[in-house]
Image (spheres, helix red, strand yellow):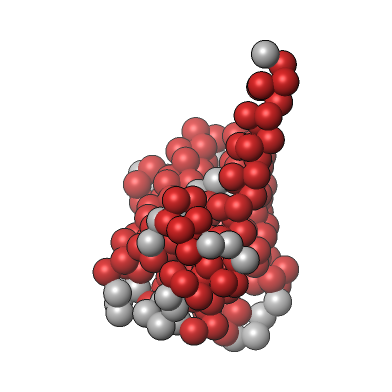
Amino acid sequence: MATRGYRSSVRARHAEDTRRSIIEAAAGLFAEQGYTRTSVAAVAAAAGVALNTVYTSVGGKSALIMAMSEDGGEDETAAETLDLIAGSDDAREILGIVARGTGRVRRARWSNIAILLDNRTSDPDVAAAADLATGIVRGRLDQTAARLVATGGLAPGLTEERVGEILWFYFGFEAWRTARALGWDWDEAAEWLAGQAANALLPS
């Protein structure tokens, strides 16, 4: 029984490694060639697997682009950031944690984010994946908003919904894209965004 369980575990790890290699290959091709010009056969070749393996491990192109977003939803840095937020009772400290955490996630997944946002209007599959990614990030920021409200350290009159919207404004995809387009480095952008969010949310 132990041997059978070990073999099953090895197969599961191999299947996950294959899946991840396929998704990474797809992401690289989508960034290089564009979503519409990338074929599943090209993804298979880049990943070094048979064409049928792509379909059985992940699926067709729509499944590949969606898997990119789903993997972002399981980001370990994002999970660690939420844990740090849950453990803090200081609103200003929480905003700094959010800024640094979202910056680390954006930096690690920058090319994937660009694929989704730059192509969302050209293909419904990409639009659906971009919507999923947006929903995941907004959900995390809404959790942060609830924690901020619970600290009691925000300016009067702010609802949890409005706090979530303000967090999305300062820490969502477009805020980071704008900062990077201006040539700001990641730490500089994080510090500035945290400061602006503090001005909007904390008592004066």
Residue reaching furthest left? Answer: 124
Can residue 100 be spotted in the picture? Answer: yes
| Residue at image location 44% in from the left, 51% down from the top | 56
| Residue at image location 61% in from the left, 59% down from the top | 21
Relative image position of residue 126 (x, y in whole percent): 35, 68
Considering the image in quadrants, where does the C terminus appear?
bottom right
For this view, does 27 lie left or right of residue 90? left
Can residue 68 be spotted in the picture? Answer: no
Q: Which sits in the foreground, 38 or 78? A: 38
Q: Which sits in the foreground, 150 or 11? A: 11
Relative image position of residue 142 (x, y in whole percent): 43, 45
Q: Is residue 202 positioned above or below 131 on the image?
A: above
| Residue at image location 43% in from the left, 63% down from the top | 65
Answer with the quarter of the image where residue 111 lies: bottom right
Relative image position of residue 138 (x, y in whole percent): 42, 52
Q: Is residue 74 positioned above or below 100 on the image?
A: above
Q: Which sits in the foreground, 6 or 62? A: 6
Q: Which sits in the foreground, 72 or 95? A: 72
Q: Is residue 198 positioned above or below 177 on the image?
A: above
For this view, does 37 lie left or right of residue 13? left
Relative image position of residue 180 (x, y in whole percent): 60, 79
Considering the image in quadrants, where does the N terminus appear?
top right
For this view, does 186 lie left or right of residue 118? right
